Image: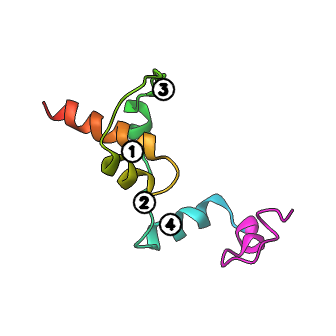
Amino acid sequence: MATRRTRRRKTAWNRLDRLGDAEVRKAAKADPDAAPVASSEWFRRAKLLEPQPKVPISMRLDEDIVKWFRARGRGYQTRINAVLRAYVESR
């Protein structure tokens, strides 16, 4: 099985391996698509939120609703949970 580095992709891993931290920061700042580099203040204020354990239940849903979520691929139950959470949090 091919590893991440041997697959043919656009990332030049050998070039990246040679870059130092300062060069990586400079490249990230120059990239308009890169997420902003988090400051030490952000890390100081950040809180670790561990995922809540899920509770298995049996629920009856309309067939078209289930088909719609399943048609979007793996993770459909997680998406249903996210929709329910958004509804609860909007209240």
Q: Earlier in the sequence, mark 4 or mark 3?
A: 4
Q: Which residue is mark 3?
A: 50
Q: What range of the chain is rendered magenta?
A: 1-18
Question: Which residue has dot 4 on it?
Answer: 28
Which is closer to the viewer, label 2 or label 3? Answer: 3
Whole-angstrom CA distance, mark 2 to mark 3, is 23 Å
Task: Please name which of the two marks, 4 or 3, marks the residue nearer to the observer.
Answer: 3
Most extreme residue toward the front, as rendered? 63
Q: In the displayed structure, would residue 8 be above or below residue 3?
A: below
Which residue type carries mark 3?
Glu
Figure label count: 4
Q: CA distance from mark 2 to mark 4?
A: 8 Å
Residue drawn at the location 46% of the way across and 73% of the way down: 31
In the rendered structure, which amino acid carries the disc numbered 2? Answer: Ala
Q: Amino acid at mark 4?
A: Ala
Helix or strand or loop: what does disc 4 sit on?
Answer: helix
